[in-house]
Amino acid sequence: MLALLCNVLGVLLIVAVIALAAPLTVPRLLGFEVYEVVSGSMEPAISTGSAVYAKQVEPTSVTEGDIIAFLDKGGVVVHRVAVNRSSTGEFVTKGDANPIEDFEPVPYDNLLGRVEFVVPFVGSFMTLYAGVVGKVYLLLAAACGVMLIVLGGCMRATRRSREQELIDEILGGSTRQVLADVPMAPETALASASKRRSRAGRLRTAAIVVLLVVFLGSGGIIGYTLWQYAMSDALYYDTSERFTSDNSRQSLQEKPPKTVDFASLRAENPDIVGWIYCEGTPIDYPVLQGTSNEQYLRTDYTGGYNVDGSIFVDYENRPGFVDSNTIIYGHHMNSGSMFACLEQWESQAFYNEHPVMWLLTPTKNYKIVLFSGRRLNSHSDWYLPVAETDPRFEAMLAEALEASDFKADLAAIVPGYSSSKSQENVKLDPKAHYVMLSTCATIFIDNDRYVLHGMLVEV
């Protein structure tokens, strides 16, 4: 009974692993790209959290009514084709839930593929296991499944061996008499059977050892990763305790919520250029700027290896946050640390509770008044240096405001703003200084980022 239970549990584990991995891996092997739907613009046909599977096709083969995935303003959009203008090489698209067609046509060059099928809810679920740690968990579960099946086989073999020994004891010498009737000698038959049992036993032992190594190795990787997360959290918590003091009892209109001892902090690393803080979130970190964007990817401010890395400014930005758009990067950690919480600004309710962050520097302190949160492709113009005289910047600000997941409180950054005005018609000051906080947005699209745009308001 116990052997049967081990077999059943092992088979169920392996089937579960295959069922979880198949929706992501098999379609990619067949040439599909997988995208997670994060908005309701295609409801009810495609609900939020669904996984859509798109395959590259010739743009001219797309017909009206087809659903396509395409690049739009640095992000990936999944909408239905209303018109395919082959003469001009562009699509007119529309979200099923939107009352009107999309404002701008989609050039053929922006086509990523035609959506061939949709699986509800799978997109948001796959994010749990599609990362490195998730894959290790799947490998661990598969190893457990195989070990249970092998264990069940060993238990059955042991039971059969004991049954045979019992039969031999009961029959005594009659067993050898039966073997004498076969063509080979009794001793040869017994030796052959013994060899077969020995060989099978060695194979089972080898399989168990290999699977045990996989099991322990996978468990070790997970344990080591969790330990690294804990050590990183402890380091940054201790850093905040050592180098910052709480001003929460004072009026926030007079002082920021924290005071930073930059003299002591920069004595440990002169690359520290600021401190970023957002109350009620994990964001409470020193900000660094190195000589390349790789320098602090997996290095903390002490110079040691750290799985979380650091929050750092793009090396091409000028020091002092004086550029029109200063880019600040942070990892999207599975533990929730660093900039993992940026995607929570997709929710209007979360924005309403956290409309500002704080950027403290050795010379000045700023409120980061947030006005836009959205997904963006890492090849977007927003990741290029923006000169103060760049005539495109005003249009870029308007585009970011229009594409935002939340509706911002513009009265804080637009002089004379009236809530009766349409947000799409509001112009942000292109001469002001802005920051863009950037983190990885999804495991399905390598270049997908989630960003927050904010204006720097000196305190």
Image (cartoon, rainbow, N blue to C red):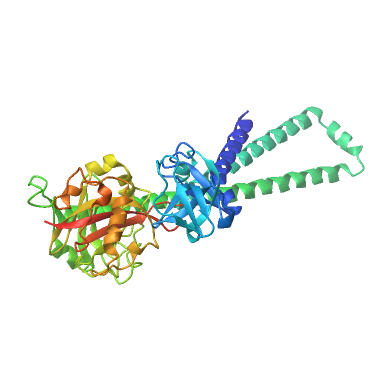
Q: x, y percentage for residue 295?
A: 33, 68
Q: Is residue 196 left or right of residue 152?
A: right
| Residue 259 against residue 418 in the figure, above or below | below
Quarter occupied by residue 264? bottom left
Residue that extends furthest to the front in the rendered view of this protein: 87
Q: Is residue 253 left or right of residue 298?
A: left
The residue shown at (13%, 62%) is 364
Q: Nearer the viewer, residue 320 or 310?
A: 320
Location of the N terminus (image quadrant)? top right
Quarter occupied by residue 396? bottom left
| Residue 365 against residue 416 in the figure, above or below | below
Q: Nearer the viewer, residue 242 or 336?
A: 336
Q: x, y percentage for residue 19?
A: 57, 41
Q: Nearer the viewer, residue 264 or 207?
A: 264
Q: Is residue 394 left or right of residue 173?
A: left
Q: x, y percentage for residue 8?
A: 61, 33
Q: Nearer the viewer, residue 371 or 92?
A: 92
The residue shown at (63%, 50%) is 206
Location of the C terminus (image quadrant)? bottom left
The reply to whether residue 426 is visible in this rendering is yes
| Residue 150 against residue 385 in the figure, above or below | above
The reply to whether residue 57 is visible in this rendering is no
Q: x, y percentage for residue 31?
A: 59, 54
